[in-house]
Image (cartoon, rainbow, N blue to C red):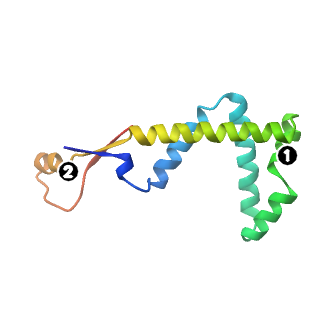
Amino acid sequence: MENLEASSIEPINPILFEFFHRYAVSNLSDKKREIYQFIENKENQLEIISLNEKEFIQLMSENSPYKAAADYFSLDILSIKNVMDEAQDDIDRVINEKCNRMKWIDCTEKMRKTYGCNDNQWSFIFVS
């Protein structure tokens, strides 16, 4: 069985990346997670109602998620920005750690021998 390091598999599968991202967000401190998710939800709402990138940028400017978060959490915008920067650093670190530990173990030959298959399917086990 051959081990494949995550760094040798570029780019990472979007579904796997989303899984790691959700995991990283769930591991933020309560304060960081609440602020991060509040802003992310506001940005997603604006993305849904915008027709194109230009309109999205305009809506972001007119309806700043950072301003809304500052008002909602009774903090100044700079504090919100700092929390978001810290949260993003934490998320990036967790995702990088997960990717660096990630291994795909090729079990193709073992599966073919066990089940007597000679098709073109590959079998891998994912370990993180």
Q: CA distance from mark 2 to mark 1?
A: 52 Å
For the point 39% across and 37% down, the residue is: 101
Q: Using the image, tell me which numbered label, if any, was put on residue 123.
A: none
Mark 2, residue position: 108
**Residue at image point 86% right, 38% down:** 72
Kind of residue at badge 2: Thr
State which quadrant residue 63 falls in. bottom right
SS at badge 2: helix
Residue 66 percent across, percent down from the top left: 81, 46
Look at the picture and state if 30 lies above or below 54: above
Depth check: 105 or 93 in front?
93
Q: Position of residue 69 (x, y in %)?
A: 82, 42
Q: Is residue 121 left or right of residue 128?
A: left
Task: From this view, report whether residue 118 is shown above or below residue 19.
Answer: below
Placement of the C terminus among the 4 image quadrants:
top left
Give the number of the disc on residue 68: 1
**Is 96 on the left-hand or right-hand side of 71?**
left
